[in-house]
Image (cartoon, rainbow, N blue to C red):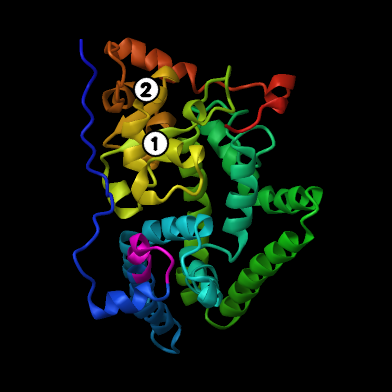
Amino acid sequence: MTARELHLTDPVFVPPTSYNALERAALALIRDPRDLPFVWLTLQMTFVLLPTAAFLFWPGNFRWWMAPLYWALLFGVFFDRYILMLHNTSHRPLFKRQYNGLKFYIPWVLGPLCGETPETYYIHHITMHHAEGNLPRDLSSTMKYQRDSALDFFRYWSDFFFLAMFRLGGYQLGKKRARLVLWLLVGELSFYALVAVGFAFAPAPTLTVFIVPFLLCRFLMMAGNWGQHAFIDGSDPGNSLKSSITCINVRYNRRAFNDGYHISHHLQANRHWTEHPAELLQNRAKYVAAEAIVFEGIDFFQVWFLLMTKNWKSLASHFVDLGETPRSEQQIIALLQSRVQRLDVTRPEMLAAVPA
């Protein structure tokens, strides 16, 4: 039986025949023409979301019926796209070296509107998560949890929400990165000071614009990371093909810059987001050999939800069988269930594992 042919509909870069004047002006600022969508998203947030938030703070303007409309704008139009723009520009600088000062605009001005405290994402994700690769020393590691358990997810989220920033500071101090600890403190405390002042003078707009997005952001970040690293082969936990998943042909990839290709991203953290579909096609044999987990038509948050509800049949129906011999539904479910079991992170081989 021949292997299933993969037809990927996720975005790739198609060079235009020419650029207009506005595009040429933007290209003069950025390093890679494939990242023009980040410029347009930044401008949209600057001229739509930022003035809308400011309007809510203008004395006498706010009414409670405006809050759900603002959240619809934020979460329906900008939130997921912003988070993945922040993700990509953290891995690959957006602006040319001579315009490097512009790099602060995305995390410091736009970030708080999406619940992101300035600098924390970079320090947590780039210098810790990718360095440790979901292994035991990764502060956001899912390994020690039963990953189809809602109770374990609550423990995971609680640990991150209440303790992760303290542990992240300790982690960076242990690596002798005092400068990163300083930036972490400056970013976190600046956001909390902004919220405190805002709440003192305009509590309702502050709750709407800053506090609710912050709470939802930290929940969604953990739900997403749980889905990305829910299926782990305990015999080879450092292998990104066996500790991450990939989601293909899903709306989320078209909105969020191919974020579904998490295996490809962990294999090469600075791989450009437009190159992920080609990587899967080129290295399919490696995915097959590792029994890599690939889903079609669902994203990480849907994976998380299906795990929380133990809906194995739905997960199996979206599973992409890349091998020559198709598995039965029971075989797929057995594979998936074998990869969500709690792992003993104190075992020497676990502590000795390195990301690959």
Q: Is residue 146 above or below residue 128?
A: above
Q: Quadrant of residue 81?
A: bottom left
Relative depth, front residue between 246 and 63: 246
Indicate the quadrant containing the C terminus: top left, top right, bottom left or bottom right: top right
Front position among marks 1 and 2 = 2
Q: Main secondary structure of the magenta part?
A: helix
- Who's the residue at 38% across and 50% down the image? 273
Indicate the quadrant containing the N terminus: top left, top right, bottom left or bottom right: top left
Q: What number is the disc on residue 285?
A: 2
The region drawn magenta spans 30-39
- Who's the residue at 55% across and 72% down the image? 104
Residue 22's spot in the image, x, y percent?
A: 28, 79
- Who's the residue at 31% across and 17% down the image? 323
For residue 51, say whether it is visible.
Answer: yes
Q: Name the amino acid type tagged 2.
A: Ala
Query: Looking at the image, how many numbered discs can be counted on the residues?
Result: 2
Task: Please check the rendered image and state whether residue 34 is part of the magenta-colored stretch, yes or no.
Answer: yes
Q: What number is the disc on residue 305?
A: 1
Q: Earlier in the sequence, mark 1 or mark 2?
A: 2
